[in-house]
Image: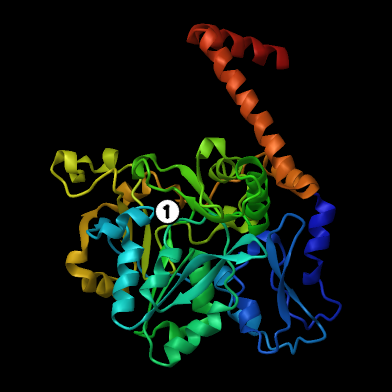
Amino acid sequence: MSDENTMADTSYNTHKDPSVPVLFSSPEQCCGCGACAAACPVQAISLHEDGCGYIYPQIDEALCIRCGRCKQVCGYQHALVSESAGNAYAAATSSTQIKYSASGGIFGAMARAMLEQGGVVVGCRYDNCNGLLYAAHHVVDDKADLPALLGSKYVQSDMVSVYPKVKQYIKDGHNVLFSGTPCQIAGLHGYLGEKLWASSHLVTIDLVCHGVPNQKMLQNYLAEVKQKYANNSEVVDARFRPKRDGWSNSLQLELVFSDGSEKFIPSDQSSYYDAFLALKTLRESCYHCPFAGRKRPADLTIGDFWGIEEQCPELLEGNGGPFSLFAGVSCVLVNSDRGSEWLEKLGSQLTMEQVPFEAVAAQNAQLKAPAALPKDRADWLRAFEQGGWDEVEHLWLRAKRKQNLRRRVGKLFPVSVKHVIKAVGKQLRL
């Protein structure tokens, strides 16, 4: 993405009237959670896409009343986190519903318990927007609507409309379970304020977040997929990491089409999925995330317990333990007393074993540091800005061909020869 376009896209932060709040001075300072837009009392803030589809807030100077509410609610820049980090667990639900979840089914179990108690659940689902999938947060009060919130959706969701709904539910005395990325949880914290945030009616869950691409990227990619696989049938669902081959072999993308057909694509054969895993398409703030560590913004943190077979092999069923690599295992971090209390309410619905935090973090890099910024990320963004996902696909295919060629060449030479070639190469560059 060119500097010229970046400047143009963020120019709304340089106002003619210096009394208008400046929400952020560079892209890494905004996570796009939309709390500022939801909190504005005169609706002077709206979210706009930059040249690559990442959303940023824009203030209408003519409407702005200079109250400063937008800056007050920014949980990302204020890095709102729990005061203390608690215990870590390996966990899985005993329910048959585990197969519909990405890992151990912890969110699903908590969500069903919340609904059974008369509360509501807030999470991300896909909507159909003019034939395109659109990820947005919604409030669910019926078990029949819960499956749409389950599973991984590797894209940033729209949050703006759900903030006031959550606030009203809490004020009305309803219990609310809210799930989202850490920056979305922090946005909710800032929007609600300390009094409502501390309410016993609210429990929050953040995800061990890899980072997020944007909706325009996903929609562009799915449009390409539609042409390639489905004879122009619409994509009605995109399920990342389905458990058709088990949790430990779940790095696939399952696409469901309007004609009833399905397509399973391994992650390394999907340009969108592969670019996501390689950190090429995350928004700028993800590479500077203040929540990528042990201290978290939510009551509970959930994710996949990747590497459990190496870190805690005694916990697997083959070694006499309670967990299955096929069914899935979650990691759970308890960050507050409120989170601990809600876990206790689930009782026998969960199987939990306390583990060292370091065991959970060993293969969950975002529990130690933000995503590393790839050196060639700008090339991928430039390709998308200039030619949409079709151009990214070409870039990805070229990179795959080079990678495969290097592998084939590498197999032709023993290690000793490779060392000589590298040494000669270094000398030639001097």
Q: What count of labels does the image hold?
A: 1
Amino acid type of the residue that numbered disc 1 sits on in the rendered structure:
Leu
Q: Residue at x 85, y 54 (%)?
A: 4
Relative vertical location of residue 374 with respect to residue 191 in this rendering, above or below: above
Relative vertical location of residue 396 with respect to residue 315 in this rendering, above or below: above
Q: Position of residue 278 (x, y in %)?
A: 56, 41
Of helix, strand and loop, which one carries label 1? helix
Q: Residue at x 65, y 16 (%)?
A: 426
User: Which of 256 and 240 lies nearest the eye of the viewer?
Assistant: 256
Q: Position of residue 43 (x, y in %)?
A: 70, 85
Q: Position of residue 162 (x, y in %)?
A: 54, 78
> Which residue is situated farthest in the front direction here?
259
Q: Residue at x 39, y 77 (%)?
A: 142
Viewer can see residue 77: yes
Q: Residue at x 30, y 64 (%)?
A: 86
Relative vertical location of residue 247 with respect to residue 80 in this rendering, above or below: above
Coloring scheme of the render? rainbow
Quadrant position of residue 81: bottom left
Relative vertical location of residue 275 with respect to residue 3 in this rendering, above or below: above
Q: Position of residue 406 (x, y in %)?
A: 59, 19
Q: Which residue is mark 1?
A: 367
- Dot 1, how many residues are within 10 Å of its Cα: few (below 14), some (14-19), or many (20+)? many
User: Which of 403 and 18 lies nearest the eye of the viewer?
Assistant: 403
Quadrant position of residue 12: bottom right
Quarter that holds the C terminus: top right
Quadrant position of residue 206: bottom left
> Which residue is situated farthest in the left direction here?
320
Viewer can see residue 104: no
Left/right of residue 240 with respect to residue 342 in the rendered view: right
User: Which of 373 and 152 lies nearest the eye of the viewer?
Assistant: 152
